[in-house]
Image (tube, rainbow, N blue to C red):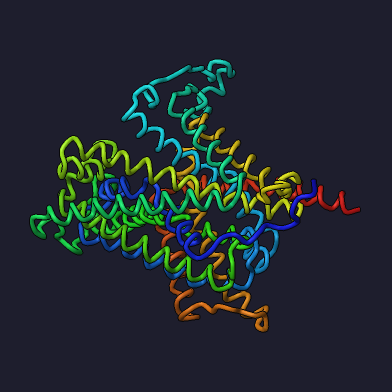
Amino acid sequence: MTGPARLQKRLRLFDAVTIVAGSMIGSAIFFSLSIMAQWVQTPGILLGLWIFAGLFTVLGTMAFGELAAMFPHAGGQYVYLREAYSEFWGFLFGWTQFAVVQTGFNAAVAIAFAKYLGSLVPALGEENVLFAVPLADALPGGLRGLAPEWLGHWAVSSAQLVACGVIALLSAVNIRGVREGALVQNLFTVLKLAALAALIAAGLARSSGTAHFFPLAQPIAGPAVALSAEAGALQTAFLAGLAVALSKALFAYDAWNTVTFVAEEVHDSERTLPRAMLLGSLLVTAVYVLANVAYLAVLPVGEIAAVAENRVAQRVAEVLFGDLGSTLVIVAILISTFGCVNGMILGGARVNYAMAREGLFFRACAKLHPRNGTPAVALVYQGAWSMVLALTGSYSALLTYTTFASVFFGGLTVAAVFWLRRRQPDRPRPYRCWGYPITPAVYLAICLAFLIYVVQGAPRETGFGILLILSGIPFYGWWKHRRQVLQE
């Protein structure tokens, strides 16, 4: 049977908006404020960081919208970087997505789903360890101390198997068809928005005043910031802590560009993609800001920072509804994480498909399913690596390094708007970045400042993030050489 030569256009505006919003809203909104409060304990600044991150995201969508309308092809950001700079930069982005960002995110959110399912069904939770293997014991004595923690004592729990099952199930749904994947996305995005809206309404209704929201701007460092006796050093430490706190909010907003990966499958993508990214990011910004307002309306910032396992939403729901509230939030997290994994799986495989189509990834990933017209092999590869990360447990360490990579490639992509306007001034632009050149310039300035301060605040994590990006260089050389050999 001869399959379709290209991906089919089966997605419309509502589907695209739910891919944007559903991929962004995972588990972070239920935890991040507690983590941020460990670095910064000024309520007004914390809320300001969520608003700032939302506006930053909106600025990014405006620039990406111009590129999406110019290049409505599968792979999205990979294509933009390739067209603006070279296939080398496009490959490094795609490699980082496959090796760490997309697959690690799939693993982490699937584990979060399984972890909370285990709260309701303990046999499926993390505490139920099925087997453990002390792999470090098999290494020579001199190497044991160098082995990563997960390798030193590898253990597999029921939660990891549940996570693998979720990844496998949703990969199968998306192999079945892009419409099937979109229907799952639409349903779970609507459900998670409804759950968050209910929590927001209850929290705001319970508010006893504005005391928890002050001070608004006084720089109060959290316990995670290493304080110094010198005022100048203290100010620098607070700014670095501010950047780390901002990185947690940015992580919650991440994945808004996932919809660009499915550009070839969107009807009237030149108009639909810019609108979907803008609408989806504005919707999520409103939900995130209101959710954090609701958390602060119920709990003081000190208590938020000290919540066990950073479960701020669960603690708020317990205050509002008692023991029932805890169960309701767990159900909301299950809905949210399941839909988030689906959106990431749906979009992510299209990057690998686009790379393989150009000879820069495993050739089999360029094949479409003969009946369903989906990048089935790319979905299998993505799902398999996501499950490996879930089983090893290494995803949790890898994810701490990805915000740097995400902001770096985001800035490089927005800079492509300037570069392409200079190099290809006559190329049709169905949508032009609103506020150009000011809005993309502001985005780039924020990127640069964030990258500088996050390096100061978390040098080890950002250093590993850079190494993860650079690890793609030998693979690029190998696939490029192989492509040349096949063409001769």
Horizontally, is 82 left or right of 418 in the view?
Answer: right
Report the residue at 15% width, 45% height from top. 320
Q: How many marks?
A: 0
Figure check: 359 above or below 383: below
Figure check: 264 above or below 395: below
Horizontally, is 154 left or right of 356 in the view?
Answer: left
Q: Nearer the viewer, residue 316 or 195?
A: 195
Task: Give x and y (percent) for residue 414.
Answer: 53, 69
Task: Give x and y (percent) for residue 202.
Answer: 18, 52
Figure check: 59 above or below 403: below
Horizontally, is 37 left or right of 276 in the view?
Answer: left
Locate the N terminus and report the quarter of the image it occupies: top right
Report the residue at 55% width, 73% height from top. 271
Horizontally, is 61 left or right of 199 in the view?
Answer: right
Image quarter of residue 305: top left
Task: Give x and y (percent) for residue 328.
Answer: 26, 40
Residue 120 makes an appearance in the image:
yes
Report the residue at 18% width, 62% height from top. 218
Residue 474 makes an appearance in the image:
no
Task: Give x and y (percent) for residue 30.
Answer: 31, 46
* Residue farthest to the bottom, as pictured: 426
Image quarter of residue 127: top left
Q: Nearer the viewer, residue 304 or 454?
A: 304
Report the residue at 49% width, 36% height from top. 166
Q: Nearer the viewer, residue 104 or 120?
A: 120
